[in-house]
Amino acid sequence: MENLPLVMITGTRKGIGKYLAHYYVEKGFQVIGCSRSSVDYELANYQHFCLDVINEFAVKKMFIDVRRTHGRLDVLINNAGIASMNHVLSTPMNTVRKIFDTNVAGTFLFCREAAKLMQIKQYGRIVNFSTVATPLKLEGEAVYAASKAAIITLTEILARELAPLGITVNAVGPTPVETDLIRSVPQEKIDNLLSRQAISRLGKFEDIANVIDFFIQEKSEFVTGQNIYLGGVS
Amino acid sequence: MEKVVLMHEKIVDIIVGESKEVNKKLKNKISVELREAAPLFGENGILDSIALVTLLVAVEQSVEDEFDFPVILADEKAMSQKNSPYQSIGALAQYVGSLLKE
Ligand SMILES: NC(=O)c1ccc[n+]([C@@H]2O[C@H](COP(=O)([O-])OP(=O)(O)OC[C@H]3O[C@@H](n4cnc5c(N)ncnc54)[C@H](OP(=O)(O)O)[C@@H]3O)[C@@H](O)[C@H]2O)c1
């Protein structure tokens, strides 16, 4: 069991994260997941931690647990994220802080702690989440899209800082995928978004897993600091 | 008081031990025989930032295992040439001790 590749995925209770937890267990990975609430599923080779990704103490304790049990971490997928659809003039500051905390600070904290663990074996793959809402300048998503722009910059610079430790850092930018995250976005907005993609359809979980699979392969060691948008958005 | 001194000694031992490990990969070695006075980083330091980070991570993990308490060796002044809490093994030990006392 100890020889199975070890992947940590944040935000596995539902949506894309839940799919990825199942997908990587099925692929023969040992999966460690987390979210604020517990999960309604049980999987062999899956361990869940209930925590908020911005709680430094709780996150640190999880990493200590992983280090003591496994002594390494091969892959980190920073999927946990929140969005908010609102006009700038009616967006409360509290929403701004929560989005930046969860999406940017949470991603940063996990990258930092994962890198400490990955450097033990001088090997690691980190995948962060961006969104097509950033390049498409999606109105109503200013704060969310800005937080994801920050994640791209973080990805690019961490790629350089962590390269000497054998760790690659990349990002995947999904198009709209049917999850709770986009439930509050009006259909008309979604249709408009899809029409601006090179390939005008909703994204599937499989599309995202495919890009992650590419980034986390051992032979992708020369691919770092990259962001891949789906659907032909650039 | 005695307990604090003992803890400080234990932390110095950990840092010296991890410095020896890091030394295996370094051309410019940490003078572990100087113990607390051994320069690490900053004005008279011998570590570059990547070697410093490697040492800090190793120390962090050993301290956590020894004292069974999460510590995070992250400091605003870490990379400062003048005021880094990582200038010497002694300074680093003081800093680690202050985190454990918090
Ligand atoms: N769906 C899309 O159309 C789309 C498009 C582009 C990018 N993305 C990105 O894809 C990622 C996943 O989105 P999704 O659609 O799967 O969202 P989702 O269905 O809303 O799920 C979000 C997941 O993250 C967890 N989570 C949220 N805040 C957390 C926190 N502070 N600490 C720990 N876990 C937290 C949630 O669990 P708990 O509530 O239990 O914490 C949940 O499992 C996000 O980064 C999102 O920005 C999604």
Image (cartoon, rainbow, N blue to C red):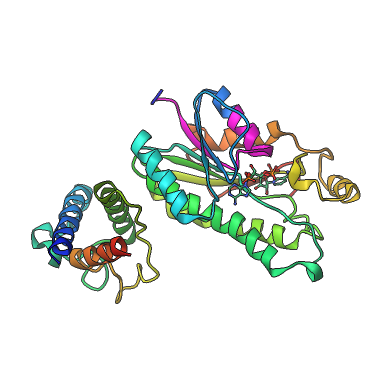
Residue nearer the viewer, A30 or A40: A40
Residue A86 seen: yes
Residue drawn 28% across the image and 66% down it? B98
Residue A153 seen: no
In the image, taking residue A85 as reference, residue A81 lies left or right, namely left
Specify whether residue A29 is painted magenta.
no
Rendered-image quadrant of the N terminus of chain A: top left
Whether residue A142 is situated above or below residue A114 in the rendered picture: below
Q: Residue furthest right?
A: A188
Residue drawn 70% across the image and 50% down it? A131
Whether residue A91 is situated above or below residue A195 in the rendered picture: below
Q: How many marks?
A: 0
* Residue range (magenta): A3-22
Please state the horizontal and vertical placement of residue A169, each as a whole percent of the image: 52, 47
Residue nearer the viewer, B66 or B23: B66
Please state the horizontal and vertical placement of residue B23, each as a whole percent of the image: 19, 51
In what quadrant does ligand 1 lie? top right
Residue drawn 65% across the image and 56% down it? A148
Please state the horizontal and vertical placement of residue A64, each as a whole percent of the image: 37, 44
Residue nearer the viewer, A133 or A198: A133
Whether residue A26 is situated above or below residue B26 in the rendered picture: above
In the image, taking residue B9 as reference, residue A148 lies left or right, namely right
Residue drawn 12% across the image and 61% down it? B35
